[in-house]
Amino acid sequence: MIYNKIINQEHAKRAVEIALSGNHSIKFIGNDEAEQLKQACDELNIKTIAVKSCRCGNLNDQERDCLCRLFEIKNHQRGKKYRTPTDLTIEVLRVTPAAYLKYERGKKQESVNEVKKRVKKAKKNKVAEKITDEQTLQLLEIALKQLHLSLNQINSLKRVAQTIAKLDSSFEIKVRHLAEALQYRQRN
Ligand SMILES: [Zn+2]
């Protein structure tokens, strides 16, 4: 399994787990690492897109310079692939030398089978359809006012929050679940 060969990328792996638990689609924005994550998701039958952050792919890279001009970045980010709506969007950073060495020195990474066990358990959990928790409602209100989401985007956000609640064995969407779901929205 390609998943077992992915080094670090904990943020992206968490998104893969959520996608598997709730049949969500994912977009990975980045270079080779994004492609590798896409291949891992293909093996797990998750609807996935991998797209570069800009034409050269180095936008937001801490160690390499982006060679694109501003209009090229804008054009790229207006592209069909970049704009395809998905439930989860993850900006995947390159594996830095420090991250690679951490992997070599660190303990064994979690295998996909361990993830699948949690997913199986999460799928059996039930989460209330309506949000009744007052703190969650307050965060939702702030998000709706600031982000100008379409109804489709609101539904997608809520479905992701529900899946996160299931993974947490919670009967309802708590503020931490919604806060995490908000992290997976595409920012530009
Ligand atoms: Zn670039």
Image (tube, rainbow, N blue to C red):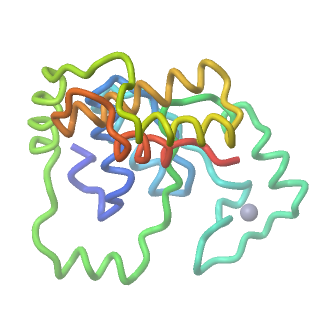
- Measured from the top left, where is residue 103 in percent x and y? 24, 74
**Residue in the image at 84% along x and 45% along y:** 75
Please name whichever residue, 38 or 121, is drawn nearer the observer in this view of the structure.
121
Please name whichever residue, 100 or 144, is drawn nearer the observer in this view of the structure.
144
- Measured from the top left, where is residue 128 in percent x and y? 28, 19
Query: As drawn, is 124 to the left or to the right of 11?
Result: left
**Residue in the image at 64% along x and 67% along y:** 60
Corner quadrant of residue 24: top left
Corner quadrant of residue 131: top left
- Which quarter of the rendered picture does the N terminus lie within? top left
Determine the quadrant in which ligand 1 lies: bottom right
Please name whichever residue, 22 or 45, is drawn nearer the observer in this view of the structure.
22
- Measured from the top left, where is residue 136 in percent x and y? 42, 38
**Residue in the image at 65% along x and 54% along y:** 53
Query: Looking at this rendering, what residue extends furthest in the front direction?
Result: 134
- Measured from the top left, where is residue 92 in percent x and y? 49, 57
Identify whether 49 is placed above or below 15.
above
**Residue in the image at 65% along x and 48% along y:** 187
Query: As drawn, is 91 to the left or to the right of 172?
Result: right
Corner quadrant of residue 174: top left
| Total tally of numbered discs in the picture | 0
Identify whether 14 is placed above or below 158.
below
